[in-house]
């Protein structure tokens, strides 16, 4: 294709960004050495068990010593000591899928090993509740929304039902994100301390939705945000906790080469050619269609395959619709491999990330972006949208590259695939950045300090 045609096509792609894409299937040219199977056929092959396997035993604190060192572990034990008789309840809205569940799965066993007995409860709700909370989520990220009385009633009545069903006898309560925020109404005067942990970016919320939630949030004793840029002015104290990953989890632990190869073979991924991967729920805010467009632009200049692997969180009813949009945008290109994975695919995701030449996270809005943390930890050259918590992790051209458009993403895919030494150095820098800032053990330390502040066992000055 000549340069003029490129420009025309790039402009057309730019115009289509943000629209629902219903493009006709794209015919991929036949390729020597590539898999013969059409993309859709490979997508359908059942590869992963249809029921969750028994979870592996959680790691013990001592298992982290080779990664963070003994002094850091001793510090955690020291900080936990005054909290040993205390109990904590954490509540969120899904036990599987999404970054919050991912973190709680590791945080809670570690706090418990430190004898800070922590219980994890998940609120329940009907489709109507999760449709409202999903709409709130999008509106809090700045989307258009008309807040109706019906939506407010649905939100409050499910919160009330959960409040009636649950018991609140612990010393400390950590309520994650807006969905269960109404549980604060169970707060008893002079009993227990309540924290609202907000994982999303509230910098530009829909005023009606935020106006509705804010009075609830201001009943908490403290709020925790993932970045100062995400927070709002509030009448209650705010703390900054970076989210984190667990280097020993199935998602992030080292894997042997044979297993990585097997996963690629199972999914029809050719490891002799470059692999560009985005791992994300099928959610428009993750811009999977934009990733396909960027891949198609880059593919005119460099050979590569695109892997889009994701699944739906149980609190996200839009996933199936977006998956269909992604399939339509991919057409019949056999080098686009779309994997709709069950939530218990941590090992497979780990292997896909490790097999990748480049990891992309082209989000349009983002919380912190744990998939970016995971990719950086694996030393992968990472291309990511400059939104939410991503710029905290991806320092442009040092620990990864930031992009703002389909064209920018395409350019960086092409650049990194043709400059492997630069890409490798960024990958190494990214891993160090995560080790310093975003591992689970740092998060445990922050919680212990906050619990101490709220219970009055340390002075505030020691903890910023
Ligand atoms: N994830 C997963 N399966 C999927 C898609 C994502 O296990 O099909 C994981 C991903 O590896 C990461 C988390 O879910 O650990 C997503 O967190 P992130 O902060 O990137 O985004 P969120 O989904 O919370 O918006």
Image (cartoon, rainbow, N blue to C red):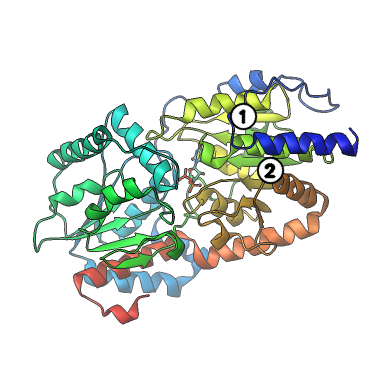
Front tag of 1 and 2: 2
Q: Position of residue 315 (x, y in %)?
A: 37, 35
Q: Quadrant of residue 459?
A: bottom left
Give the SS element for disc 2.
helix
Question: Residue at coordinates 40% horizontally, 40% vertically from top-left?
Answer: 55
Mark 2 and mark 1 in contact (Cβ < 8 Å)? no
> Residue at (54%, 27%) from the top-left corner?
323
Say which quarter of the image contains residue 298: top right
Q: Identify residue for label 2.
A: 406
Pick the residue in front: 252 or 411: 411
Q: Is residue 187 above or below residue 292?
A: below
Q: Earlier in the sequence, mark 1 or mark 2?
A: 1
Residue 4, quarter of the rendered image: top right
86 on left or right of 460: left
The percent coordinates of residue 123 (x first, y second) are 26, 39
Q: Is residue 240 visible?
A: yes
Residue neighbourhood size for the residue with mark 2, other residues' Cα within 10 Å, grouped as few (<14), some (14–19), many (≥20):
many
- At 67% from the left and 27% from the top, the residue drawn is 330
Residue indicated by mark 1: 338
Residue at horizontal 29%, vertical 51%? 211
């Amino acid at each position: 294709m000549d340069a003029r045609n490129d420009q025309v096509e790039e402009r057309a792609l730019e115009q289509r960004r943000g629209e629902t894409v219903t493009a006709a299937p794209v015919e991929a040219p036949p390729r020597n050495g590539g898999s013969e199977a059409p993309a859709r056929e490979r997508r359908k092959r059942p590869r992963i068990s249809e029921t969750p396997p028994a979870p592996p035993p959680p790691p013990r604190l001592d298992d982290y010593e080779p990664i963070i060192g003994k002094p850091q572990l001793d510090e955690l034990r020291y900080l936990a000591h005054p909290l040993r008789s205390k109990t904590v309840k954490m509540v969120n809205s899904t036990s599987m899928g999404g970054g919050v569940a991912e973190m709680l799965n590791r945080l809670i066993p570690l706090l418990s090993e430190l004898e800070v007995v922590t219980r994890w409860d998940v609120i329940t709700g009907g489709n109507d509740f999760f449709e409202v909370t999903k709409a709130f989520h999008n509106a809090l990220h700045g989307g258009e929304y008309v807040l109706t009385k019906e939506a407010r009633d649905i939100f409050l009545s499910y919160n009330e039902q959960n409040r009636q069903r649950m018991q609140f006898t612990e010393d400390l309560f950590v309520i994650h994100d807006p969905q269960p925020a109404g549980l604060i109404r169970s707060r008893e005067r002079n009993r227990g301390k309540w924290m609202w942990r907000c994982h999303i970016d509230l910098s530009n919320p829909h005023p009606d939705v935020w106006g509705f939630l804010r009075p609830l949030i201001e009943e908490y004793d403290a709020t925790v945000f993932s970045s100062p840029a995400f927070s709002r002015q509030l009448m209650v104290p705010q703390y900054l906790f970076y989210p984190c990953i667990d280097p020993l989890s199935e998602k992030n632990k080292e894997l042997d080469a044979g297993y990585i190869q097997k996963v690629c073979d199972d999914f029809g991924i050719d490891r002799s050619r470059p692999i560009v991967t985005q791992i994300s729920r099928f959610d428009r805010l993750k811009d999977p269609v934009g990733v396909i467009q960027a891949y198609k632009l880059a593919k005119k200049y460099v050979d590569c395959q695109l892997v889009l692997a994701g699944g739906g969180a149980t609190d996200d009813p839009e996933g199936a619709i977006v998956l269909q949009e992604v399939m339509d945008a991919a057409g019949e290109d056999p080098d686009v491999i779309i994997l709709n994975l069950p939530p218990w695919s941590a090992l497979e995701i780990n292997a896909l990330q490790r097999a990748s030449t480049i990891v992309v996270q082209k989000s349009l809005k983002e919380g912190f972006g744990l998939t970016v943390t995971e990719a950086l930890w694996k030393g992968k050259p990472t291309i990511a949208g400059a939104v939410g918590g991503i710029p905290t992790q991806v320092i442009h051209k040092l620990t990864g590259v930031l992009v703002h458009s389909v064209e920018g993403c395409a350019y960086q895919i092409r650049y990194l695939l043709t400059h492997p030494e630069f890409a490798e150095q960024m990958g190494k820098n990214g891993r160090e950045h995560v080790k310093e800032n975003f591992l689970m053990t740092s998060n445990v330390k922050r919680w212990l300090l906050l619990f101490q502040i709220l219970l009055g066992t340390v002075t505030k000055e020691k903890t910023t």
